[in-house]
Image (spheres, grey):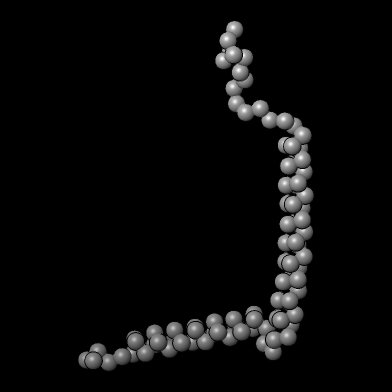
Amino acid sequence: MTSDQNRIAGPQLRSGPMITSAALVGGGALLAFAGFVVGGSHFIAAIRRWVAEMEVPPGEVARLKWAQARAAAAAGAEAWQKAPANQ
């Protein structure tokens, strides 16, 4: 048997450093998730306060703008249909 036949294919890894690195990655992921939760909850609370302080709620503004757009489209269509044919 030669030394080439005793070789194991692939890298040889020790379990200790692999377990340590997995624990560190897991801990880091947990800290990152906690950071996202804290930052996200603060961001959502700030947006809710901002919306609550508005004079007109965003839903009402959207309804008003939609009504304006519909009226403008209807007026444009009517003007186009009633336009003199000789122009």
4 lies above or below 29? above
| Quadrant including the C terminus | bottom left
**Residue 6 horizontal/vertical position (percent):** 62, 14
Q: Name the one closer to the observer, 30 or 83.
A: 30
Instruction: Name which quarter of the figure residue 39 lies in.
Output: bottom right
Q: Which residue is situated farthest in the left direction here?
A: 86
- At x 72%, y 61%, the residue is 36
Left or right: where 8 falls relative to 20: left
- At x 43%, y 89%, the residue is 75
- At x 76%, y 46%, the residue is 24
- At x 61%, y 84%, the residue is 61
**Residue 82 horizontal/vertical position (percent):** 33, 90
Q: Name the one closer to the observer, 24 or 31.
A: 24
Instruction: Name which quarter of the figure residue 73 lies in.
Output: bottom left
Instruction: Name which quarter of the figure residue 54 lies in.
Output: bottom right
Left or right: where 16 falls relative to 79: right
Left or right: where 75 falls relative to 31: left
